[in-house]
Amino acid sequence: MKKDITCTDSYEAQKLASLIYIKDDNEIFINGILEIIENEIIISLKDKSAHSILFKDKFQAESFADFIQSVIDGTNKITETKVHEDIVEITKK
């Protein structure tokens, strides 16, 4: 399943793609979603740090949260991420 997520700009898109980070065993670096505030998501990483990502709008933020939750829960795995300007294309299976 593929999902295109639009961020506020290319910087935020690059940041999101780097925070997703696929390790050799196809695990993501995101540990959980701490909070969604309008178009902003605060995520926690496996290294115990927290980071903010700004999306184009509230719909994009909620769409990403819904899409990534099954990966965080271990039901799905991220297989690929691509960045095209302010859009991150995420593929999971």
Image: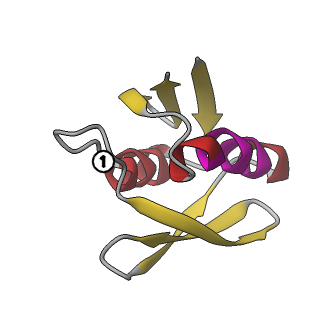
Residue drawn at point x = 60 percent, y = 26 percent: 4
Badge 1 local density, few (<14 within 10 Å), some, or many (20+)?
A: some
Q: Residue 24, relative to residue 82: is it above or below? A: below
Q: Position of residue 39 (x, y in %)?
A: 75, 59
| Residue 89 in the image, given as x and y percentages of width and height | 50, 26
> Tag 1, which secondary structure?
loop
Q: How is the image coloured?
A: secondary structure
- Circle 1: residue type: Tyr
**Is 49 rendered above or below residue 92?**
below
Main SS, magenta residues: helix
Residue at (42%, 33%) from the top-left corner? Answer: 78
- At 62% from the left and 37% from the top, the residue drawn is 6
The answer to whether residue 7 shows anywhere in this view is no
Q: Which residue in the structure is indicated by mark 1?
A: 21
Judging depth in this view, the residue of 89 and 67 nearest the camera is: 67
Horizontal side of 55 relative to 86 (left or right) equals: right
Residue segment shown in magenta: 61-69
- Single out the residue that lies furthest toward the left: 24
Which of these two is toward me, 14 or 73? Answer: 73
Residue at 33 percent across and 46 percent down: it is 27
Q: Which one is nearer the viewer's eye here, 9 or 74?
A: 74
67 drawn magenta: yes
* Position above or below: 89 against 62: above
Image location (x, y in percent) of residue 16: 45, 51
